[in-house]
Amino acid sequence: MKPLYRILLIVGMAMGVVATTLIIGVGQAMIMHMQSHSIGDEDVYAVYEGDSGGWTVGMPLDLAREIRSWLPDDVVAAAVSFDQHDAEVRIGSEFYGARVVGVDAEAHLLGLEVVDGRFFTREDQEHRKRVCVVTADLLELFGREALRSISVNSREYEVIGAAQGDLYLAGLPLGIYSESSIFFPLEVWYEDFNAGRFHDGLIMQLGVFAPGYSKADLSRLISQNLIHMEDAPALKVASPGDRDNTQWAKDLLVLTGIFLVAFIVFLLAGMNIIQIASANVYDQQRVFGLKVALGALPKHLAREVMGEIAACALQGGYLGIVLAGIVNTVMNSYVGMYWAAFNLVTVVSGVLLALLVGWITAVVPARQAAKIDPVAVLRPER
Amino acid sequence: MIELIGVSKVYGREASTVRALDGVSLQLNPGELTAVMGPSGSGKTTLLNIIGCLDSATSGDYFLDGRDVAKLDLRAKAALRNEVFGFVFQAFNLLPDKTVLDNVMIPFRYSRVPRRQWKSRTLAVLAQLGIEALALRYPDQLSGGQQQRVAIARALVNNPRVILADEPTGNLDSTTGREIVEVLKALAEQGGKVVVVVTHDGMVASQAHRLLQMMDGRIIDDSKLEVGSVVFSHPKA
């Protein structure tokens, strides 16, 4: 095979692998994206102060407490603070970039499941006990022994439990929680990390567990009380199903666009491979004719063509994986939180699919090679 | 060993048929260099292709060592091309991206010769033709005569009993052409092979033991040549 054809085939295969990994990766992302829209616990809501210039405004703790007082007794509500960005968390001898969040004792009813020890109580909170609860991932990462206590800004806190779950599902307008969050009693958090300035608007939301109540019920309850307030804040009630549909649709559109582009690239790469491989066969007619004269059977020629294309497919596959990784990284940095899955499954299935496509597309030129009439192609050019 | 009886080859269908061979009968014997001459379109190459099992006769009989070639399947014909026949072409048909050694080894790919013997057998044939020093060169590093010797080495590497050469000197100057014909003649005389050479060149034909003159798909003259016979060249076109 001529070097030019080899290069073109390798590039074609690489394009095919990039396209297939994108198709599979973006396909997975699309499924996850669509599933995320349907997931939601309808009994959990978030009350938060509305946007100001694109930013969610934090509410003071006393406002959160007041809102809580407006709610019926059978409704559980817990204030949740913003993340304390500059806290220095030390676990054992290691500094770790964990998120430091203050919550009310009832927060564990909003989507967190205690998997080790216990969550702190209202009593712990009122007595300003220096205790905290870590996420299950942190517990798994460092082990129970290292997590007997942690140090934040050089203060020691007893770790009394570990919890897992997705607080975002509780309708938080900002998804500030990660696998490495540490939850502190809200008052302790204010005193230790905000110099006890309780009036600072650092409450991100009031998480509400209100079984039997609709969002409209909660909105009505809150509105009724807001009417009587001077300088009433613009409070909003959100549920997990309320995610920004416009953004969701935009993201889905972007993913669908990438999926379609990848699919078109995939088809073009496939046709490209057939064209190049056929051109290669056409260009080498004399060679194939010669080989027939030297004893080759059609199956030998077909096997040689398929072998050459398979070799290019393999080389293109390696190149494609590298390119797919780069494309994926670049794409994810632009697409944002809805990343395309680029994992072992994606890579392996991408390469296998590309090889399959390579094999299928090799069939056409292989058949062409097998059908070559040696008498016709070896005829001297006059 | 090779016997053709009333062999015809017709190309095309119905009104637009071309009779490339028309009832050709002949016997080819070991140790004999046979030259086939005739104007273009007289059926020389078609005859060579049918003898070499590259093409099939439309009618007539072709016996190789007493076997009816028409009854052989694709695989058996391919095995004959690989083991019994060696082809030499005007355009050499060497693969430019392969060394002399690799070019000459190509027939082994389709044979039952164990891989461990490929190189030694190839080098032996190259030595026989005096070109073993060129083994690692590429075709574009060789002269025309050297390239044709490599092509002959490729035809000989599987030790065939029949050498079929289509205009082997067509791309060579007269001195080199004469050398190549001497090689082919030696293969017939010393190697006991059947050598058939299609040519327009009177010099080449005059070296043969036997001359077949063709016209319109028929053999119009089949004569033994004496040493020193003069044969006039045919115009190519």
Image (tube, coloured by chain):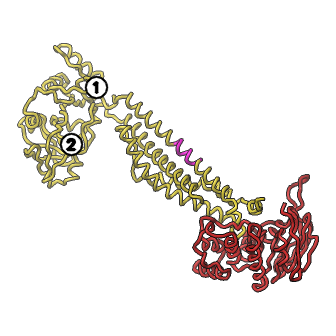
**Dot label at residue B83:** none
Q: Which chain is yellow?
A: A
Report the residue at 72% width, 68% height from top.
A293
1 or 2: tag closer to the N-terminus: 1
Callout 2 secondary element = strand
| Left or right of B26 on screen, residue A213 | left
Magenta segment boundaries in residue numbering: A263-271
| Left or right of A129 on screen, residue B220 | right
Residue receiving disc 2 = A181
Report the residue at 61% width, 63% height from top.
A304
Work out which residue is located at the far bottom of the displayed protein and give it.
B190
Mark 2 is surrounded, within 10 Å at the Cα level, by few (under 14), some (14 to 19) or many (20 or more) other residues, namely many
Judging depth in this view, the residue of A97 and B189 nearest the camera is B189
Q: Chain of mark 2?
A: A
- Position of the N terminus of chain B, as image quadrant, is bottom right
- Position of the C terminus of chain B, as image quadrant, is bottom right
Amino acid at the residue labelled 1? Gly
Q: Chain of mark 1?
A: A
Question: Is B140 placed above or below A231 here?
Answer: below
Residue receiving disc 1 = A54
| Left or right of A60 on screen, residue A255 | right
Callout 1 secondary element = loop
